[in-house]
Image (cartoon, rainbow, N blue to C red):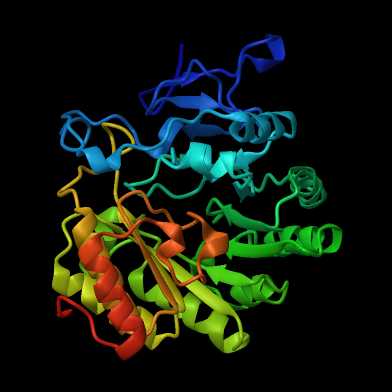
Amino acid sequence: MSTLKGIPVVIDSSSAGGARGAAGTPEAVRSGQKYLTAQGFTAIKDGMKPLREIDRRGLAGKPGWLKARPAVGEGYDFVRRTVREHRLATVCEEARCPNIGECWNAGTATIMLLGAVCTRACRFCAVDTGNPRGWLDAEEPQHVAASIALMQLRYVVLTSVNRDDLADGGAAHYAACIRAIRQRNPETAVEALTPDFQGVLRDVETVVDAAPAVFAQNVETVRRLTHPVRDPRAAYEQTLAVLAHAKCHRPGLLTKTSLMLGLGESDAEIAQCMDDLRAVGVDILTLGQYLRPTVNHLSVERFVTPEQFQQYRAWGLTRGFRECVSGPLVRSSYRAEQALAGNNVGLTPLAGATAATGATAATGATGPAPP
């Protein structure tokens, strides 16, 4: 086996009939192992090199409320076949989303643009990492638009890997995908969950000018934990600036972000993050439990209870978010088309939290007072 900087490299054998996963990764590759992609560059499976010492916190013994529905059903099978046939990369699979069965059975999927290999290596994320060296699929905009038409989606979330190897971070390609979808599927609403484009605001404008219904960029965690949680090229203030500029450039645009909990943040830090997001006009906030994807990723520091998630939702609504979708298995794209329904996207609330949330909507008061 070949090696690169001391890490074994699996050579892609797909041309000789070797099996490959949905995103084109050779199926024999293990987590943390380098492999050679079909496009000729190397990538690390799941984005993190193997650790010398393994901390097993958060890998077993999860509480019962974190059990997701099985990924089975006719709708799931249909979307899965469509994804395979059209060689689409979905964040549902790449990020190991626990809601994949529920969402795919509902006929929705989050499409990942610009390939399946990210130039960054955030320590919470299981997307493969590498340097695509400028590779792009020029046919992707029309390809994605056709796939969405086939799946008959009324609402689609487009996300992407970070592409710091491209001069504009992939903004023009991203915008081309949005335009192709809107041209072929005029009834389909598009949510753009973008990278930060290294804070280059003209690249943010490129995507916003393509007229998505929602513009999202995830802050991921509270200010203090941005590093080590996110890649060094990401920054808390940079994400705030991207969200602020998107709203400034197109004032009627809905903006959205997501926060993972369970990484060691305090209640006071969560409240401060909410305040920071509202200060730049963010409309929609999603809150969910961080789940460790592999032994090489960050450990889980706590499992947030469903009751606490309901309390945090009340805090968000009090601060003026149009919706704060909050629950253990919530992810940034979870039931995105229902985000403005005002009912926590249909999640079953606890009896005590229902009254608190209702009071928020009626009077601006909550049950537990936020910090």
Answer with left or right where residue 90 lies relative to residue 234. right
* Quarter the C terminus occupies: bottom left
Residue 248 on image: x %, y %: 56, 88
Q: Residue furthest right?
A: 184
Identified at 24% across, 62% down, the residue is 351
Looking at the image, which residue is at 58% across and 39% down?
105
Q: Give the quarter of the image for residue 50.
A: top left
Residues 89 and 37: in front is 89
Residue 224 shown left or right of residue 165 in the figure: left
Instruction: Left or right? Give the position of 208 relative to 328.
Output: right
Task: Count numbered badges in the picture.
Answer: 0
Which is nearer the eye, 114 or 371?
371
In the rendered image, residue 56, in percent from the top left (x then y), is placed at 17, 31
Side (left or right) of 356 relative to 91: left
Residue shown at 38% from the left, 53% from the top: 330
* Front-most of residues 69 and 131: 69
Asked if residue 241 is positioned above or below residue 117 in the image, the reply reads below
Q: Is residue 227 visible?
A: yes
Residue 4: x and y in percent read: 43, 26
Q: Is residue 334 above or below residue 182?
A: above
Horizontal and vertical percent position of residue 55: 15, 34
- Quick check: can you spot residue 131? no
* Rendered image quadrant of residue 322: bottom left
